[in-house]
Image: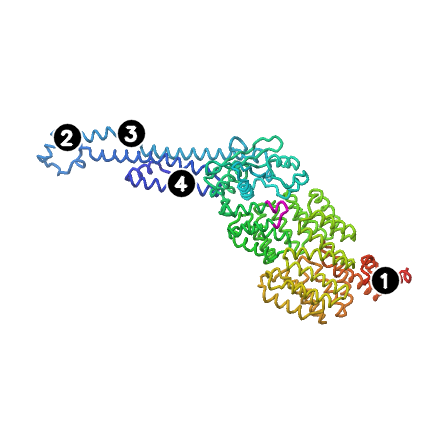
């Protein structure tokens, strides 16, 4: 129990320097406790400076009290002995003994004025203050000051939570709902430096992403709205952002400016109500020079985040901006320019700028992650993407907590393909924020890769519900997953909604073409791909997607001459961009189609060899080398030795951690194709069955069916052929350009042999319809199918 009297007595016994040491030690402990509570219990960040002021005010009071009390004690020690002193005070003599002469003189003589005067003077001087500067008063004053600080702090927190007074947050006041979206507009460069304004905008975007009170509208959502307003390509100033917010039902727009003051800068941030223009938040911060900009942005962001609402503990525990971005203003400049380029559809420019940013700061984890995501979106440079994700993962301590979990999940999904580890990372993030849109979407990708399509679809829907401004990628994944799970009508509805929300986006057009092909409406698919190519003029990625789709459709329909023309356009684009790995993949698929459909084995083999001579694998990044696809294509063209050599090189060159999952399954299929080419059918069956896992459900089926047929297991062959033609997938055209026609043909023949006339007629009819406009060299096979179909109808009715 606290005993003030004992504490006063203990302090009273100490010397001045001992008291100073005790005070300084106690002050340090108090500040450490306050700092800990600020970080862990969510105390306001002004309480630390306030406590320092109180301690500084208390220090001279403590010194004065110690000085006065010590002086008072010393003066008492110097006071003469009283004439009536007891034997204990004046000396000791035996009972009955007469006083000595000296004692008598001392007892009777008057006090010497020269010995008494100094003691009285000191006592008089101290007497004026000793009643005020007492240890009791000093300790009670300190307790009262810190008690008042505690009361003020509690009142401030209560007002903040209740939405009352200057401490109120926008969420507590009901101006914003928790997790409402706001738009971040471009800062104005009053200093005449638009690039610096851009840096502030993107750095603030990173820092504001750490708030748990609101969320920033996805840039893709804002850009789509700008295109609908025919404002695409310009700056997103405050007025334009307010117009977007009004159209899209967004409650707030954050903007500001950066101005020059001498060699320094003044940063101002404001949150504005879109309709009324009312300023809901206005904060400012200064930076002594450009090297202090990042720290100033961090302070500004913390002020703004406190005004939004949410947990003070969460705000105060977030790492500083420099710790989760970069200390290099030049690297941050490159990053901000890259983000702007990517957001406006200039991915190649963005990639180049991101590479410059990580060259300036090799530990810039956020730039590495953005580089990996941008390369993945391009879908053509896997090795660079894997390297970027790996570097981001290695420096994940330089990321915000959210970005760290996302980076970990991506690393285990795309680099090492460890789905359980990826699931753990995303679920850890969702425990912190159950509505994190990207965590939900990426978790859906993992479950989709495990063929758990229902759970994946549910996660994509949750992602869309959690953040309607971040919709393009979840929509795309949802449509593909619904198709894979057999819910094509649901996929059509989601695609229609997606297209309506993003009418100028390219991805919905590509998805619509694939869905049309899946329905058998190939003319519609060709029209949509032509539309995609026209609207994507100048964008090599989407033009390549259109050319590839047109070539695949033509080959699936037996129109090889037309397909070759589209392939030539595709190969020319890949060659111009120096994408040798993607070039070899395209040639391998074309060669496989020639071998399987036309039976042109020597020509197909020569195509493969010529392409390898033009783009030697040794000159490519390891993960860009399509070893397994080339091995499969060589095996299909009846060159198992070359196929085996490529597989051996694949195993020698790539570390085991890069050969798991997708690549391991592809290698198993290549081994199965080699065994099939050499007549080892049972062994081929084993390889193909082991590869039947992961996202690609169609990939092993044509080879597995052929292996069953070679082994004399016709019923199993029919079942697998049927499974191939009936498995729904938006990516069917990749395999259909090689296998769809011959599978229809072979199913018709196998059912005909079994005298299952209905099934035989069904597949003969499908072949005739598919190859109706096929090249002349395929028309005899179409005629044979038609004749057999006519005969079945004539004989069986």
Dot 1 falls on a residue whose secondary structure is: helix
Q: Is residue 769 above or below residue 114?
A: below
Rounded to the nearest angstrom, the CA distance separating label 2 from label 1 is: 142 Å
Magenta segment includes 632: no
The Cα–Cα distance between marks 3 and 4, rounded to whole angstroms, is 29 Å
Q: Where is the C terminus found, in terms of image quarters?
A: bottom right
- Asked whether residue 628 appears in the rendered view, the answer is yes
Looking at marks 2 and 1 on the same chain, the residue that comes earlier in the sequence is marked by: 2
Q: CA distance from mark 3 to mark 2?
A: 26 Å
Characterize the local packing of mark 3: few (<14), some (14-19) or many (20 or more) Cα atoms within 10 angstroms: some
Pick whichever of labels 1 and 3 is earlier in the sequence: 3
Q: Earlier in the sequence, mark 3 or mark 4?
A: 4
Q: Which residue is mark 1?
A: 783
- The alpha-carbon separation of the residues under discs 4 and 1 comes to 94 Å
Q: In what element is the residue under mark 3?
A: helix
Q: Dot 3 corresponds to which residue?
A: 129
| Quadrant of the frame with the N terminus | top left
């Amino acid at each position: 129990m606290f005993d003030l009297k004992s504490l006063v007595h203990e302090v009273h016994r100490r010397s001045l320097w001992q008291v100073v040491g005790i005070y300084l030690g106690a002050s340090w402990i108090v500040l450490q406790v306050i700092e800990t509570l600020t970080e862990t219990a969510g105390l306001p960040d002004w309480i630390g400076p306030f406590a320092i002021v109180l301690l500084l005010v208390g220090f001279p009071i403590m010194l004065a009290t110690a000085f006065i009390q010590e002086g008072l004690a010393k003066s008492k020690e110097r006071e003469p002995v009283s004439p009536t002193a007891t034997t204990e005070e004046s000396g000791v003599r035996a009972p009955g003994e007469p006083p000595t002469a000296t004692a008598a003189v001392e007892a009777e003589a008057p006090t010497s004025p020269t010995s008494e005067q100094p003691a009285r003077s000191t006592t008089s001087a101290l007497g004026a203050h000793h009643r005020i500067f007492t240890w009791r008063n000093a300790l009670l004053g300190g307790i009262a000051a810190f008690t008042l600080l505690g009361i003020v702090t509690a009142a401030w927190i209560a007002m903040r939570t209740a939405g009352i007074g200057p401490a109120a947050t926008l969420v507590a006041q009901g101006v914003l709902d928790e997790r409402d979206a706001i738009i971040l507009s471009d800062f104005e460069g009053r200093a005449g430096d638009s690039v610096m304004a851009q840096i502030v905008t993107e750095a603030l975007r990173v820092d504001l992403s750490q708030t748990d009170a609101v969320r920033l509208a996805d840039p893709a959502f804002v850009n789509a709205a700008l295109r609908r307003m025919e404002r695409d390509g310009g700056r997103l100033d405050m007025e334009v952002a307010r117009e977007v917010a009004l159209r899209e039902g967004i409650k707030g727009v954050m903007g500001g400016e950066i101005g020059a003051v001498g060699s320094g800068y003044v940063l101002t941030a404001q949150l504005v109500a879109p309709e009324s223009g009312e300023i809901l938040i206005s904060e400012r911060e200064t930076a002594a020079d450009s090297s202090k900009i990042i720290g100033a942005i961090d302070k500004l962001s913390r002020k703004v985040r406190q005004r939004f609402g949410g947990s003070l503990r969460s705000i105060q525990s977030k790492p500083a901006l420099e710790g989760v971005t970069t200390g290099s203003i030049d690297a941050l400049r490159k990053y901000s320019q890259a983000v702007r380029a990517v957001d406006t559809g200039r991915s190649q420019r963005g990639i180049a700028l991101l590479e410059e940013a990580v060259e300036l700061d090799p530990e810039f984890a956020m730039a590495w992650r953005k580089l990996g995501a941008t390369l993945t979106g391009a879908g053509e440079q896997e090795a660079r993407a894997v390297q970027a994700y790996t570097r981001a993962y290695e420096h994940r301590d330089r990321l915000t907590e959210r970005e760290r979990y996302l980076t970990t999940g991506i690393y285990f999904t795309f680099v090492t393909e460890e789905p359980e580890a990826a699931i753990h990372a995303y679920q850890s993030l969702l425990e912190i924020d159950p509505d994190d849109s990207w965590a939900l979407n990426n978790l859906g990708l993992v479950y989709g890769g495990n063929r758990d399509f229902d759970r994946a679809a549910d996660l994509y829907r949750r992602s869309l519900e959690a953040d309607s401004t971040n919709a393009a990628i979840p929509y795309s994944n949802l449509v593909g997953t619904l198709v894979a799970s057999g819910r094509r009508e649901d996929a059509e509805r989601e695609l229609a909604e997606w297209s309506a929300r993003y009418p100028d986006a390219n991805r919905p057009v590509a998805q619509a073409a694939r869905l049309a092909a899946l329905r058998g409406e190939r003319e519609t698919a060709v029209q949509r791909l032509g539309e995609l190519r026209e609207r994507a003029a100048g964008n090599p990625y989407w033009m390549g997607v259109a050319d590839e789709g047109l070539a695949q459709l033509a080959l699936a329909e037996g129109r090889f001459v037309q397909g070759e023309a589209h392939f030539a356009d595709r190969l020319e684009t890949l060659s111009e961009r120096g994408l040798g790995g993607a070039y070899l993949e395209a040639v391998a698929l074309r060669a496989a189609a020639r071998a399987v459909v036309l039976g042109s084995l020597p020509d197909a083999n020569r195509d493969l060899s010529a392409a390898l001579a033009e783009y030697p694998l040794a000159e490519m990044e390891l993960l860009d080398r399509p070893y397994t696809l080339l091995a499969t294509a060589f095996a299909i063209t009846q060159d198992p030795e070359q196929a085996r050599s490529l597989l051996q090189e694949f195993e020698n060159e790539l570390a085991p951690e890069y050969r798991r999952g997708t690549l391991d399954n592809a290698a198993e299929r290549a081994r199965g194709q080699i065994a099939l080419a050499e007549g080892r059918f049972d062994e081929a069956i084993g390889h193909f069955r082991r590869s039947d896992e992961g996202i690609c459900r169609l990939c092993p089926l044509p080879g597995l069916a052929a292996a069953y047929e070679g082994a004399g297991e016709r019923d199993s062959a029919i079942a697998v052929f049927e499974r191939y033609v009936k498995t729904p997938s938006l990516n069917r055209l990749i395999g259909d350009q090689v296998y769809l026609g011959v599978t229809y043909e072979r199913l018709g023949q196998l059912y005909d042999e079994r005298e299952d006339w209905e099934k035989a007629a069904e597949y003969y009819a499908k072949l005739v319809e598919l190859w109706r406009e096929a090249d002349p060299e395929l028309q005899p096979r179409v005629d044979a199918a038609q004749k057999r179909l006519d005969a079945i109808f004539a004989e069986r009715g």
